Amino acid sequence: MAKMEIKNLHVSVGEAEILKGLDLTVYQGEVHAIMGPNGSGKSTLAYALAGHPSYEITEGSVTLMDQDLLDLGADERAQLGLFLAFQYPVAIPGVSLANFLRTAINSRRKADDPEDKGIPIPEFRKLLKEKMDLLKMDHSFAGRYLNEGFSGGEKKRAEILQMAALQPSFAILDETDSGLDIDALRTVSEGVNALSGPDLGVVVITHYQRILDYIKPDFVHIMYAGRIVESGGPEMALLLEEQGYDWIREKHGIKA
Ligand code: ADP
Ligand code: MG
């Protein structure tokens, strides 16, 4: 089974070391949740995996399908089957969601086969319709300009649709820490539930315990001060709900 393996990852932003030896292994078919208080480094992990130039990897390794991910450019990472959804998606005025998706699909096809002429329009329409139905989206949504004037919930929907259309092997979803209402949370969760299966490994990054009312992860990890300090099953979320993060601070001797 294919896996994404992160070993002893250290990431610095400027002078500050943010990730301090993070380990995580995700197999295709698994759903993982990473939870942790604000500032623990969750988004830093997502940016580092995306290859964002401000996030310098000073130590450790990341492999995807046994290939060294850190050697690859951002587009090559996507072509290898990695999908990342960010906390703050950018708006692209003048480009419809449908056109954006078609371009993204074609770029992946071209990476697999340089001779590829792109997905035929009827096939693309069929795929889009199928995925929108699966995610219970109104078809008119695909005609709107990407993220322009989208509500928080609509941005999340657009992200999930991108994930559905691109059919990645691994998806990392960084959820917004503020301003994501319960409907948006539900959208993400239902999307993940609809799309997860043996060919997809998912990491949902969140500080909301509530998301676990909707998504049933196989594993829950708690991130603190740049490391995963606890891993367990869904029962871990209950512990957090009852006891907050204090017991983790105490157990690991971390100053508040
Ligand atoms: P989380 O997503 O868990 O809330 P972040 O990864 O966003 O945490 O941030 C972890 C720490 O790294 C914070 O102290 C934050 O201020 C710092 N940090 C993250 N990104 C940057 C950046 N681009 N520039 C400066 N500091 C950053
Ligand atoms: Mg964050």
Image (cartoon, rainbow, N blue to C red):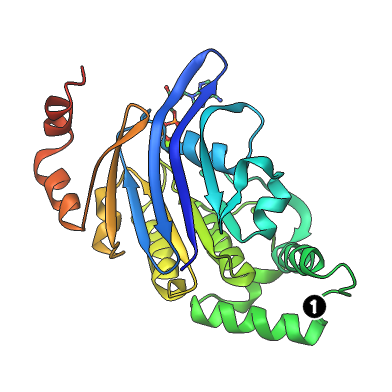
Where does label 1 land, which residue? Answer: 119
93 vs 216, left or right, is: right
Question: Where residue 230 sits: x, y (%)?
Answer: 23, 41
Q: Nearer the viewer, residue 197 or 72?
A: 72
* Residue 90, percent from left and from top: 65, 45
Other-residue count near label 1 (Cα within 10 Å), few / some / many at <14 / 14–19 / ≥20: some
Query: Which x, y percent locates residue 63?
Result: 54, 49
One can see residue 215 in this view: yes
Image height of 32 relative to 230, above or below: below
Residue 227 quadrant = top left
Q: Secondary structure at mark 1?
A: loop
**As drawn, is 106 to the left or to the right of 155?**
right
Q: Is residue 106 left or right of residue 220?
A: right
Query: At 40% across and 30% down in the image, what residue appears?
Result: 21
Q: Nearer the viewer, residue 7 or 175?
A: 7
Q: Nearer the viewer, residue 23 or 82?
A: 23
Residue 101 in which image quadrant: bottom right
At horizontal 72% and vertical 44% (from top left) the residue drawn is 73
Q: x, y (%) of residue 252?
A: 18, 27
Q: Quadrant of residue 163?
A: bottom right
